[in-house]
Image (spheres, helix red, strand yellow):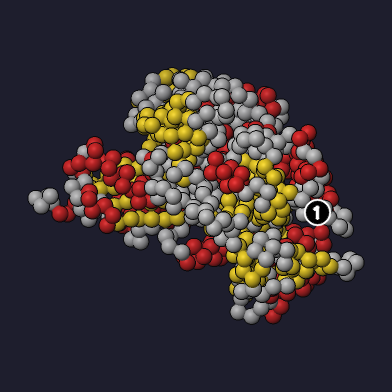
Amino acid sequence: MAGRPSVTDPLSFFTIDRGTASVAVALIAPVDGRFRLLAASAMPASVELETVLADLVARVRSVEPSWLPYADRWPSWIRLEVATAVPSRVVCAAGSRSRGAGLAGAFAGAGWDVDVRSVAGRPARTLPLSHACLDRTVDVLVVAAGDPPSSDERAGLQELITMLGPLAGRRDDLRVVLAGGAAGYEHAFPPGRVTRAPAPRPVEGRSGTPLHAFAAELIGRRAAVSAPPDGHAAYRASIASLASLLGRPVDAVDIGRSSGSRVSVAPDGPVGWMTRADGALVPLGGLDDEAQIEGILHWGPLASDDPDLQDRIRELALHPWRDTSDIGTRLRATALRAASTRLAQHWLRSARSDAGSDERRLDGDVLVVSGGALAAVPVGIAAVALLDAFRRPGMLRMVWDHARILAPLGAIATETDRRRLLADLMDDALIPLGSALVLADGRPSRKLPMVSFQGALTADGMTVTAGSLMAIDLPPGLVARAALRDRAPLSFRRRPRPATPDAWGGLAGLMVDGRPVPLRLPEGGAARRALFEDWERPFWPAAAAPAGAG
Amino acid sequence: MFDLMTAAPGTERDPLWWLPLAPTDHPLVRPGAEVAPGDALLELRFPVDRSFSTVEAVVGGWVRSVDSRGICVQTEGLGVPGSIAFGESVRGRLMVAVPDRFSELRASSIDISVAGTIIVAGARVGLEALTRARTLGARGMICGGISGRELSRLTASDARQRAALRGPAPFALVSLDGYGGRPISSLAWRRLRAAADDEVALGTDPPMVILKCRAAEPAPSATRTPGARRLVRVTSGPYVGREGRVLDLRGTVGSGGMGLHPAALVALAAAGHGRPHERRVMALADLERLD
């Protein structure tokens, strides 16, 4: 070992992404002058970390010992580590319905688990509100009003404060946030425990508003108390670096056991993000809510009213790594589609409310997908599930952060270092899932355009049936250029044109999508299941013909 | 590779037990106080008729903290952790009502002898059996798993009864392993069998069965070298609840036709008397190590 170049040893490092269900680790080391991802693994969070790291090193050594000349020293190697936790819980109370919705939206979009949303003047909500304030899992109480409070807020707000002030006094550890005009009632709460915040807008959810920024900072401060750094914040930093590195807008979605995140970044700066507890694979807060569980099963080819399947969905929330059977895999894919759809719906709702703001709307053509939710789903099925949720006309290219290294790399403090590492690791860490060309443009009466491909694919004047999803084999590394020819009469209305005509190949190939935007599903359970079955069939590996378990 | 599997939950010495407080509740104990089973911990005040009742400790120990979040008691006992809980914490005589850990308790086999007991109901319990046991005076039930739908119905039924001024008698349910039918693990089963006819407690916050510690009993997980025997338990699939020994690693097994999951060859013990031993290749993700 003495003859080896000593420079390679200190540059080997681990990335560690600790989730609430699993821990993802990766081993990165310089090979031939650039950093390479040598091995990666994801294990249930209860498995001892040192064992997983030792296993990674052993695997690399057994394949190519020269890559890790000082492998015995792995316990001292640098660890880039981030963690995500079960979202902190907040109780929201407001003087009016619209203010309550804005308040809850701002905190929910920043990653808080909103426990009770109470609006003044509704006595039926008094008891749950007081119980929630005394629940030891609730961390923060927020009371909001307009600044100044409007006439319809004032009377109800006074009632709320009269009740909540003494309740807050009974819990020494409950933090109180008074937003907007509610700050005028600071005297009603225990001294030294009140923080002031901006007033909520009527509808909130995405970043960009002062209250959302406050809620994000508050949750960040709580996360900072415990090392390692917050995984969601680090993930956003990494996606921003990736966008500037690629020089194009990037959307990202990260779905895990306890929350889901959506980030949209332009090359010159962040556009928006949200992290939601109900964006988790199976939201932990609603396991006893049969409608929620049925709602998840509605998004797949399995029967939504089967109690056994409902229990298996609940088990996914408690023990997501279990159940490796075919049905278990289908349930995971279904839950992934449902979680992606929830995130997409919240995103669109908040985007609509921002229509008058100066924020740019989502137009990224690269979607980065991350999170433990994808760990045990066949990639083609995962790609279809994501396409069903994140739909818009044009070309969408999907890449998968399979080793979950983006969040740990976001913990690097220096932007230039992070970009340099990302540039080296992009090919190893971001696996191309494939591309999707969505032909519909939201106008039901319009005929779908004809599609031609050049480059790696050669097809001319291809007609796509409305409502169908075609799978075309386009392996990773190949690029096909698409051209659309309109079949509708010439119109002065906006025509669909892909923002970029290039389709990247990937594990799921190229999807040509003739389904409507947004996706419209039949009401009947059997028809809906059959539809999902049809759409997914081409993407299941050949050995797994659809089981028709529904 | 054996170390890369999740460990089955063991038992816990002197676990914490929480008793939540409602806004009108009045605690009767202070931090540091010693409590015995049956000691009054808090006073429940009924604002309508201005009457009150007390809530008793279901387990002995000492009070760690008292604040508006609740009363936290450091118990003196052995905790068998559960996954899901329903109801209020209770204590009672433990009655093992099923012949083995794979069985399910039928409603027809529940009679008046269950009054005042906490019933070990096997792999699964249905709403009919739960309702019957509760009607006949059972204090609680322990099962391996419960259907989420039945739990929702039980919760709704309980809420309807609580709408009356005086609610139903306290009742608790602890599911040890989660949702659906899930045989009780052999470790928990042995503990519960050994504690039959003893007074035990069911804690609902967190879900836990609290047994008395026996002086001669060795401390949990200090009896053998970890991983020495490669004992595992199946946690999902058709063999759920079966236990066995890992013989060897076997590459990966498929789900959805893909070899995604590292797998092992497992020698499964018989599921009951007269049943055969089997060897199966199973995904490590569907196994929990027992030692």
Looking at this view, name the residue that lies furthest to the right: B49
Looking at this view, name the residue that lies furthest to the left: A3
* Amino acid type, mark 1: Ala
Point out residue A531 in the picture as x, y percentages from the top left corner: 61, 24
Q: A251 left or right of A277?
A: left
Point out residue B217 in the picture as x, y percentages from the top left corner: 52, 53
Q: Residue at x 69, y 45 (%)?
A: B95
Residue A305: which quarter of the image? Answer: top right
* Quarter in which the N terminus of chain B is drawn: top left
| Front in this rendered view, residue B103 or A130 | B103
Secondary-structure class at tag 1: loop
| Front in this rendered view, residue A412 or B6 | B6
Q: Residue at x 12, y 49 (%)?
A: A1
Residue B189: which quarter of the image? Answer: top right
- Label 1, on which residue? B169
Vertical placement of residue A544 versus A232, above or below: above
| Front in this rendered view, residue B178 or A165 | B178
Category of crowding for the residue at label 1, using alpha-carbon neighbours closer than 10 angstroms: few (below 14), some (14–19), many (at least 20): few
Q: B96 left or right of A495?
A: right
The chain holding disc 1 is B
- Number of marks in the image? 1
Point out residue A469 in the picture as x, y percentages from the top left corner: 54, 25
* Quarter in which the C terminus of chain B is drawn: top left
Judge whether residue B94 can be spotted in this image: yes
Point out residue A72 in the picture as x, y percentages from the top left corner: 22, 50
Residue B45: which quarter of the image? Answer: bottom right
Vertical placement of residue B25 versus B91, above or below: below
